[in-house]
Amino acid sequence: MYIVQVASECAPVIKAGGLGDVVFGLSRELENQGHIVDIILPKYDCMRYDHISGLQEDYKDLWVPWGGGSVHCTVLRGKVHGLNCLFIEPHGEAGNFFNRGKYYGDNDDNFRFAFFSRAVLEYMCMSNKRPEIIHCHDWQTGLLPVMLFEQYKYREMDGQRVCYTIHNFKHQGGGSVEILHATQLNNEGYYLSPDRLKSPSIANHINFMKAGIVYSNAVNTVSPHHAWEARFGSEGYNLGDTLSVHQDKFQGILNGLDYEVWNPELDEHISMPFGPEDFELKAYNKKGLRERLWLEDKDRPIIAYIGRLDDQKGVGLVLHALEYALRRSAQFVLLGSATSDHLKNLFWQTKNRLNDHPDVHLELGFNEELSHLIYAGADMMVVPSNYEPCGLTQMISLKYGTVPIVRGVGGLVNTVFDYDHDEDHLPEERNGFVFHHTDASALESAMHRALELWYTDREAFNKLAIQGMRCDYSWRNPVKQYIEVYENIKA
Ligand code: ADP
């Protein structure tokens, strides 16, 4: 099959979070299984050009219909670690759409990505690209299926089908009817109806994610448990009813991990490769991590947190985990970048307060290389999320023999099985510690159980870590499920 992935991120060239990892890993495994994949992305000024080889012009004068006229674009092509990537570069007035020094976070994000979606279709149409499947990701591409089936279908693109994957329901995109005019969809009365794009919560607004759900041929989120939460709980952020209307085409497919990138046996960032057979070598990475972060070298566990510092991630509990770790004579390492000024200040204050502490290191910012060292060197990873559609950090931790301590929500439920209490899994299948409530004592009780095991029965703790390393969260199975979806919807 010929599949085009359309997204706002693709690791490592454009990565703000898990979406980037997923677009890259999914595409690579699809190619490994014999399919042809192109990935279409915006050409941001701040992307990692050092990860692109052979960047060259693919389509020179693309005129993308926009508002009352059209925008001049160039499409570039290059390889990102072997994968075909195409980058849309607008010129003229729209030229600054992707030249902001960041990927997201401006007031016109809705227009920027509506434009991107329109440009992708115009490019495919004009360059005669006719994939069987267009796979769209998150709110940024929610309008693409609308434009495909309402506009481009009549421009010789009636054989394309759309699979739409939702990585985070909280960010849905949308805006006033001006967007309908900008994309030339117009026809407000038609699109603003409740069974089409009408926002479920804001009057006279359209909702991009709802558009993606209504118009795509298949829709999924990134774990089976989160699919349930989104439909029946508050995690769907007002889209639960829309999902129920479209339940026949909606499901959860767990994300995979790219084990060529995330694999302690092959990882070039870490000082000593190791696997489940020589788990004892992990200790060298722990020592290396301590040296790198100026932590005291002594017989204590290292507990880590890696992730965006965002309300989604349970930041209050992250700080509590730090304090509790110190109370229990453990060491704590944090790597995260804040998504708001308030959280940035909070974590900088904490960092300054603990700067000279021999058992703590807070690294505020995004650092891919350091993340590998932490996964390899830490003993435990806390993931106390308020909600977590899939979560990659716990799956990466498992692969690196770092025992996850997680809150039982979303994809964490589908991937981490409690050492003491999981009755659905045999003891030899269990791989971490799970707590359920959002209060500090729930977190403490799980951390307590993990720390007790580390302090009193190291052999059992290591056995648990090794069991985690043997879990298979590769892309092999998820890609089989995606291919089944593609086969079911293709024309
Ligand atoms: P989300 O997509 O909600 O941010 P995920 O757990 O799905 O969370 O994916 C997070 C990905 O981003 C993981 O690969 C993690 O290692 C990486 N990551 C998050 N924050 C940082 C950071 N500050 N530095 C390096 N990598 C990070």
Image (tube, grey):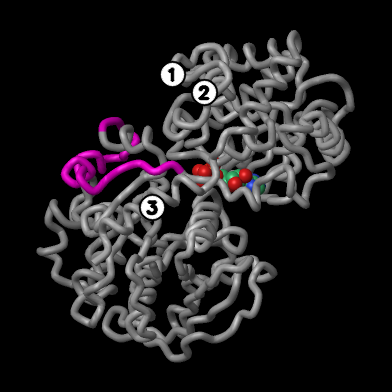
Q: Decide: few, some or many residues near mark 2? Use Cα within 10 Å; few <14, some 14-19, many ≥20.
A: many
Looking at marks 1 and 3 on the same chain, the residue that comes earlier in the sequence is marked by 1
Mark 3: which amino acid?
Tyr
Q: CA distance from mark 2 to mark 1?
A: 8 Å
Quick check: is the Cβ at mark 2 less than 8 Å away from ligand 1? no
Residue 476: image x %, image y %?
A: 50, 48
Q: Which residue lies most toward the top here?
A: 456
Q: Residue at x 22, y 51 (%)?
A: 199
Which numbered circle lies on residue 424?
A: 1
Q: Residue at x 40, y 57 (%)?
A: 137
The reply to whether discs 3 and 2 touch (Cβ–Cβ < 8 Å) is no
Mark 1: which amino acid?
Asp
Q: Which is more toward the observer, 123 or 486? A: 486
Residue 174: image x %, image y %?
A: 31, 57
The reply to whether discs 2 and 1 touch (Cβ–Cβ < 8 Å) is yes
Looking at marks 3 and 2 on the same chain, the residue that comes earlier in the sequence is marked by 2
Q: Left or right: 162 with respect to 371?
A: left
Q: Decide: few, some or many residues near mark 3? Use Cα within 10 Å; few <14, some 14-19, many ≥20.
A: some
- Judging from the image, what secondary structure is the residue with disc 3 in? helix
Q: Which residue is mark 3?
A: 482
In the image, the segment drawn in magenta is: 232-254
- Say which quadrant the N terminus sits in: bottom left
Q: Which residue is mark 2?
A: 417
Q: Residue at x 85, y 41 (%)?
A: 292
